[in-house]
Image (cartoon, helix red, strand yellow):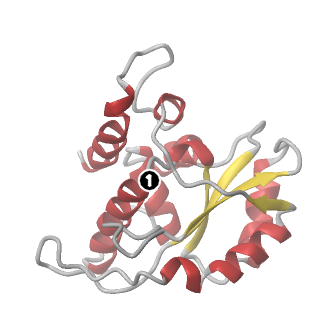
Amino acid sequence: MDGYHPVPWFPAWPIEFSNEIQNPLEIVTLFDEWRPNTRWLLMTFEAAASEVHLWTTWFAVRRLEEKNKMIARKIDAEFLRLIAGTRQIKIAFDRAGLRIGDTAAWILYLPEFEISTTFGQTKIDREVYNNNQIDAERLSEHLNARIIAQRPFPNVEGLVRIGAITEGEKIALNKCEDAYLLHSAMSEL
């Protein structure tokens, strides 16, 4: 990414499993065993739409965390809850967590730097992705997966997966990212 990109890469690494997931709980348990802390999480591949989507969700979660108003007890579950557009933790894991048959996922790190109370003034450490690369690689190896060269992109399949639209519902491709953002925002209603 060049230095002029308005939004730095979110600390998210796409991984591809060597085989389809047969037991999601086994993968998550293994991940929990090796992750450095609860600021690391696994998320279904389709749930990430863009750098803006991930940073916007992160900002909302950090705001809830700082105000001690999270619904989930842990930051990783709260992030999935917002991505899934729900107030229900179980639904969040069903929508944004791993499922049988998945072949890819995201390893994410939720940075803990301060957020500003002034709109648009939060300072994002542009090196947060690079500074956590080694931990992400180590986690992917423990999961018998490999990091693939891809960044998040909005798509209709992802909107169906997170419950933003129903199977067969039509949406213009240029409106997909907006739909992801709106769905995340709706989790507070």
From the viewer's perspective, is 63 left or right of 17?
left
User: What secondary structure is marked by label 1?
Assistant: helix
> What x and y, as percent, mark residue 57?
36, 59
From the viewer's perspective, is 122 left or right of 99?
left
Q: Nearer the viewer, residue 83 or 33?
A: 83
Question: Label 1: which residue?
Answer: 81
Q: What residue is shown at x 34% (from left), y 80% (from top)?
A: 124
Q: Nearer the viewer, residue 29 or 8?
A: 8
- The extreme top residue here reads 168
Q: Is residue 127 above or below residue 94?
A: below
Residue 136 sits in quarter: bottom right
> Where does the C terminus fall, quadrant-wise?
top left
> What x and y, as percent, mark residue 153?
49, 45
Q: What residue is shown at x 47% (from left), y 67% (from top)?
A: 10
- The extreme left residue here reads 118
Q: How many marks on residues?
A: 1
What amino acid does circle 1 point to? Answer: Arg
From the viewer's perspective, is 24 left or right of 80?
right
> What x and y, as percent, mark residue 28?
73, 60
> What x and y, as percent, mark residue 187?
32, 47
Q: What residue is shown at x 33% (from left), y 73% (from top)?
A: 62
Q: Nearer the viewer, residue 172 or 54?
A: 172
Q: Is residue 80 above or below residue 100?
A: below
Residue 8 sits in quarter: bottom left
